[in-house]
Amino acid sequence: MPHPDDLRFLRHAQTKGLLDEERATYCRDVLAQSEQNGAPQRVAQVLIRERIMASDHVAAILKEIRDVATGSQAVVGEETWAGQQLQAQSGPPVSIGDEVGGFSLTRELGRTGLWSTYEAKRDGRRFAIKILGPAVTSSDDLVGRFYAESERAHSLPAHPHLLPVVAFGSQGPLHFRVCDYVEAKSLADFVRPGRLAPKKCLEVCTAAAEALAFLHSQGMVHRDVKPSNILIGSNKAVHLNDLGLAKDSARVDAQLAQVGFAKLIGTPAYISPEQARGELEEISTASDVYSLGATIFRALTGRYPFAFNAYMRTIQAIALGPPPALSSLRPDAPPALNDLVLAAMSQDPGARPTATQFSQELGALLARERLLMPPGPPGAAV
């Protein structure tokens, strides 16, 4: 008999329209068979492994069930992304002090359901090394995708606002990728306690837009632009981080469309309408522009463009749009910036500026308004 929580999950997924009766029955049969074989499985494992449901949807349903049980109602934001919802999963089989690919692990920097990140050293230099977690290594498709993207990122020419991939490979059961390490805080660290002053927001996001424009010129789509992936170094250098979800847009990857993990990919608060609708074939460079527009909205207002207690309500709101006017929440921001953010967050991908146009317009706005902008409100990050 499957675990009661797994049966509750399947019922909830059906009421949300994410699972039909045929697939729910199939899952119940697989769970029952695993019990009989003495190796019981859980429904989340089956759904993701069999590519029946996207991992974001699995994580969202788990959260909604838990919230009902505990009475908790958190606004859907970055913390609801599947990778972070699945943090409790075990990490890769390594320990501090181990050597991976010639890099000595010195401390763990963070963990999601997808990978663990460590600081590492080699020849006196510091690096950041990502090691895939069990949720990814159990799928040959995802491991293959990881290597394809790592190779593509490794081959990119240097850019001042991107962290280079210096190495990638495997060691026994481990699959890893290495980047330069920088002492930095993410834009999310500045946004959580308040709002950015317009000048600072323009400085940071112009650099991020330049990095996106460069990626797009190389035929790549980032797919997960958000505040926590924009790093601001101690020397104030800005880097767009984490190409882990990036996809070579020039490559037709038929298998990718069949991978449940990719059906809804990115962080819910910042994904584009086409991502929210699960329209994989429509995800493009314009999707990155939308996400950067949503990031600017969050940085300037201190709130998400669409914020609801329920994951699916947030996704539906993004899919239908439009977002609130930036000026309604941040009247001291330049009117031209309000217009630019609304254009970037258009429901129609074809109506959005390109990343190159976006970076140029942000840069021109920064140069034009630098001395004219009023200071940010009390307590704003500068």
Image (cartoon, rainbow, N blue to C red):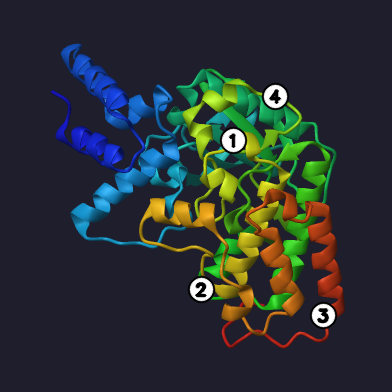
User: In terms of image quadrants, where is residue 302?
Assistant: bottom right
Identify residue for label 1. 280
Q: Which residue is found at the position 33% from the left and 33% from the top?
A: 19
Circle number at residue 193: 2
How many other residues sit within 10 Å of disc 3, few (<14), some (14-19) or many (≥20)?
some
State whether residue 5 is above or below residue 225.
above
Q: Which residue is found at the position 64% from the left and 39% from the top?
A: 282
Could you tell me the amino acid type at mark 2? Pro
21 or 234, nearer to the observer: 21
How many other residues sit within 10 Å of disc 4, few (<14), some (14-19) or many (≥20)?
few
Could you tell me the amino acid type at mark 3? Arg
Mark 4 vs mark 2: in front: 4
User: In terms of image quadrants, where is residue 164?
Assistant: top right
Residue 140 seen: yes
How many other residues sit within 10 Å of disc 1, few (<14), some (14-19) or many (≥20)?
some
Image location of residue 219, percent across then percent down? 79, 36
Pointer 4 or 1: first along the chain: 4
Q: Is mark 4 on a helix, strand or loop?
A: loop
Q: How far apart are marks 4 and 2 (CA)?
A: 42 Å
Identify residue for label 4. 252
Could you tell me the amino acid type at mark 4? Val
Q: Distance between the residues labelled 2 and 3?
A: 24 Å
Circle number at residue 370: 3
Q: Distance between the residues labelled 3 and 1?
A: 39 Å
